[in-house]
Amino acid sequence: MDMSNITELPRRMADALKDKHVGGIVTFTDSFVIATAEAAEILGLPTEPLSSMKKAHYKHEMRRLVNKTNIQAMHLTNVNQLEDGTMQQSFQSFKYPLIVKPSRGQFSRGVKKVGDDATMRQAVRELDKEGRMGQEVLIETYVDGPELDANFVLWDGQILFLEVTDNLPCPGDKSAATSDESFVETSQISNSGLPANELSIIRNSLHDSLLQLGFRSGVFHVEARMQNSSMQYQDLRGDNILDLAP
């Protein structure tokens, strides 16, 4: 099957499977999640809503829906908006540090932390040169705090299972990190070392976000940070091994 045309792929998949009596379809490649959900809808197979899949995969759509008052966010569709006179007041109101990243991306590619207006503009232009502007760009507040992964199993909106895993800091988390520092994940530790009250906040907040996005049943991998956490990564023994500690 020709999979190069992502627009036509859902229909191609549906046509190939319509007489096969399959009970469901799944993909393990992020690039094809939306196409697979659309094909499932065409075939009348079990799936979460295509509209929800799109919101979850396009970061600016998710940020628009799952909006927090303490998070600044701006969506850019092209690099020329940096010089748009109508947007300069918004740029000037930014409080740094910020994150500049492709609106749809994988493995933290293209994610950059910036500390001022000049480096923000440079980061957007670099994404344009790298060919990532076609995915559009999201600029938002850098949230300082322990990073985590939360793996949910939902059925009819209820939590059947939740695992929270700590992500150790990456080079981009350093206070003096430049826009060239990577946000690619380093190591993970399960179960989380965060205190019970913070895990409860994580559980409730992320569960609410999944429901806002329109998800009801399935397995969901959610990435987040715990803002204003009572814990931080420290080298307590002087051996260059980091642990979460008060």
Image (cartoon, grey):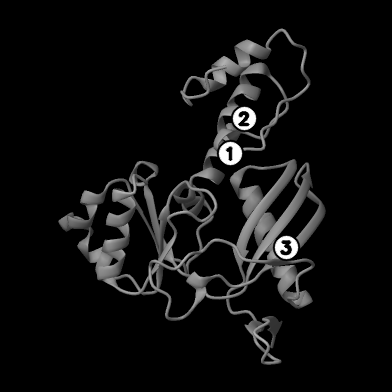
Q: Residue 148 or 112: which is nearer the viewer?
A: 112
In whole angstroms, how far apart are the C-alphas of marks 1 and 3? 21 Å
Front residue of 213 and 19: 19
- Percent x, y for residue 30? 59, 40
**Farthest front residue?**
239
Image coordinates for residue 11, horizontal then vertical, percent: 55, 16
How far apart are the two marked residues, 2 and 1, measured between alpha carbons?
A: 8 Å
**64 and 152: which is toward the camera:** 152
Image position of 32 (left or right of 236): left
Q: Residue at x 59, y 73 (%)?
A: 169
Residue 53 image label: 1
Name the residue type under label 3.
Arg
The amino acid marked with disc number 1 is Met
Image position of 6 with respect to 126: above or below? above
- Left/right of residue 192 with respect to residue 6 in the rendered view: right
Answer above or below: position of 215 versus 108.
above
Tell me where residue 61 appears, x and y as whole percent: 47, 47
Residue type, mark 2 in image: Ala
Q: Please, is residue 117 above or below residue 85 in the view?
A: below
Q: Which secondary structure lies at badge 1?
A: helix
Badge 3 density bin: few <14, some 14–19, many ≥20, Cα 10 Å: some
Tell me the tag on residue 37. 2
The residue at the far right in this view is: 160
Other-residue count near label 1 (Cα within 10 Å), few / some / many at <14 / 14–19 / ≥20: many
| Viewport quadrant of the N terminus | top right
Residue 120 screen position, x and y as percent? 31, 65
> Which of pointers 2 and 3 lies earlier in the amino acid sequence?
2
Q: Residue at 48% of width from left, 70% of height from top?
A: 172
Q: Do the residues labelled 2 and 1 touch (CB within 8 Å)?
A: yes
Residue 38's place in the image compared with 243, above or below, is above
Q: Residue 203 carries which label?
A: 3
